[in-house]
Image: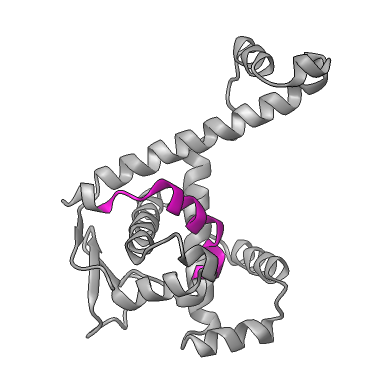
Amino acid sequence: MGNEQCKAVSAAAIILFAVVALAFLGGCSSDKVNPEGKGREVAALVNGANIYFDDVNDEYASLAPEQRANITKADALSFLIEREVLYQAALKEKLAATDDEVDSEYDYFLLASNLTEAQLKEQLDVRKSSLEKFKVALKKQVLISKLLDKKVPAQLIIKREDVEAAYNSSMFPLSGVPLEKVEKNIVDSLTAYRQREQRAAYIEFLKTNADVLIVAVPS
């Protein structure tokens, strides 16, 4: 299966997830979404779906120069494998993304990126992509987000002793800040941390059980 090869570098994956919206400018990675891949050089197969060299190159090019200094194309390929595994799992769960949900994500992307639709089209044209492909990829990410929300609950049980332990190991007692004043913030922080842990474990489980073949990594 090549499971050892397809494990993501955790630090790289965090950075790549942070810029995932920008990576959509490169289009989609799976033949199931991008059927015009004949003749393109394959970098990896994920349960039979192709990830191409130019997908990896586009993913890597979407990063800022300072990010590319710490991330390799092997990391970019690892992220694309991870995203494909998640997308396929979302399809198996029969999750769906409505046009309204995709439009909402699209509007948020423009706002967060400080782009007009015309400016986005210009960027897509440069990358030989289109708004249609962009929205297909955006729909894919909506499905992945729904999958992770389904598998990892928004509310987790945080025990009182865990809250007290976090409080006692912080600077709050020395600063004279009572537990009651910061309890909610501590609960929120512990919840977010455990959600990240559970998501990472679920993603690793999917990757470990996927049929992944890495053919070659672009240089």
State whether residue 155 appears in this view. no
Residue 215, quarter of picture:
bottom left
Question: Residue 78: percent from the left, percent from the top?
Answer: 34, 57
Nearer-the-camera pick, 177 or 18: 177
Q: Residue at x 68, y 70 (%)?
A: 113
Protein image colouring: one colour
Report the side of 72 relative to 18 (left or right): left
Visible residue check, residue 62: yes
Location of residue 112 (image quadrant): bottom right
Farthest residue to the left: give it: 1
23 and 129: which one is in front? 23
| Residue 54 in the image: above or below residue 145 | below
The chief SS type of the magenta part is helix
Counting labels gives 0
Picture layout, residue 6 above or below residue 121: above
- Magenta range is 6-23
Q: Residue at x 22, y 64 (%)?
A: 45
| Residue name at image x 32 percent, y 62 percent | 74
In the rendered structure, does residue 20 fall within the stretch colored magenta?
yes
Q: Position of residue 86 (x, y in %)?
A: 39, 52
Residue 26: x and y in percent read: 46, 76
Indicate the position of residue 176 as horizontal and vertical percent values: 83, 15
Q: Residue lying furthest top in this view?
A: 161
Residue at x 55% of width, y 56% of height = 18
Residue 87 falls inside the magenta stretch: no
Q: Nearer the viewer, residue 44 or 4?
A: 4
Left or right of 171: which side holds 191? left
Looking at the rendered image, the quarter that the C terminus falls into is bottom left
